[in-house]
Amino acid sequence: MIEQTPPIFFALGATLCFAYASTIFTEFSRNVSPIWMNAFKAFVACFSFWVTVIAFKSWITPPIETLLALFCSGALALMIGDIFMLHAMKDLGASRMLMIFGLQPFVLGLAGTIFFAQSFVKASLVGAVLMLLCLYTISLESFKKNGHWQARGMFLGLIAVLLDAVGIVLTRFGFDSTPGMSSAQGNAIRCLGAVSAFFLLNHFYYRQKERKISLTAPWSDFSKAQKMRVLLGSLMGTYISLMLYLVAVSKGQLSVVSSVAVTGPMFAGLFECVRNRKWPSIYLLAAFTFFIAGFWIFTQQ
């Protein structure tokens, strides 16, 4: 059944899960800190994936190049890249931050052409321009409201996109090097890389800055409802979404799979409007229009 399911459906399921989880990530990044939120979801994902690998006995011994590729992918994308992403979410909000990921199909299309001999459609340049117009509209909204262009949030978001793209390329290399490896095993190795990166950052960087992160202190102050909410977001945004997305990445064309993922901002925007009980702004609707147009071009590949 799974083998016969088109990769695009796995990508869509992953996008829905991550879009909802991103609203929770934004909430706790603002109320606690982006670094804590990222570390917490990385630990939840790491535990969940290793339990899955052990329970289903899905471990196979991969070559060293696969281990290194997946480990580095987790460290760069799931830890360092996601720290930038959550800082951007804190500044911009979930839906606007996810719109920045609209540039990822263009980046991955180039990467797929260079590293995996996949075709690259020149019309993707038009799609990239539309996504840039989307980002401009988001900045214009901030300028009209607050008198500044949210340049910091946009810059952090772009760094997150680049690091995530590097992580996806490394992940694809890992799966290509070991075709029989399960998505759960690949994710378990990636999450181990993310957790290891957190320990290194916490010990060598945040400790020197006197900002060492404690995972337990904020947790003990949460209400039962908050604990359930952050656990749900961490499971949906890491464990479930990564399981589905990496199945899609391992079987589908990178640029097409990632073009499905760029629908995330629309779903996140809908979740935010429902939670905040307010209609989307005219600028957000205009950004969505550019977004949908760019998405349509990317799906024509």
Image (cartoon, rainbow, N blue to C red):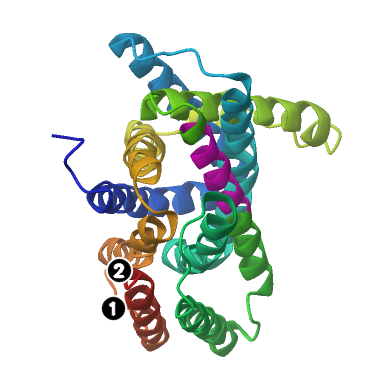
Residue at 46 percent of width and 63 percent of height: 119
- Which corner quadrant of the image does residue 296 belong to? bottom left
Residues rendered magenta in the picture: 163-175
Could you tell me how many numbered marks the image carries? 2
Tag 1: Cα neighbours inside 10 Å, few (<14), some, or many (≥20)?
A: few
Amino acid tagged 1 = Trp
Q: Are marks 1 and 2 in contact (CB under 8 Å)?
A: yes
Quarter of the image where the C terminus is located: bottom left
Tell me residue 139's x, y (percent). Answer: 57, 81
Label 1 sits on a secondary structure element that is: loop
> In this rendering, is residue 87 above or below 68?
below
Label 2 sits on a secondary structure element that is: helix
Residue at 27 percent of width and 69 percent of height: 277
Which residue corresponds to mark 1? 279
Q: Is residue 201 magenta?
A: no
Which residue corresponds to mark 2? 273
Q: Which mark is residue 217?
A: none
Majority secondary structure of magenta residues: helix
Q: Is 68 left, or right, of 168 in this rendering? A: right
Q: Is 136 left, or right, of 3 in this rendering? A: right
Residue nearer the viewer, 212 or 187? 187
- Which corner quadrant of the image does residue 147 belong to? bottom right
Q: Is 131 left, or right, of 279 in this rendering? A: right
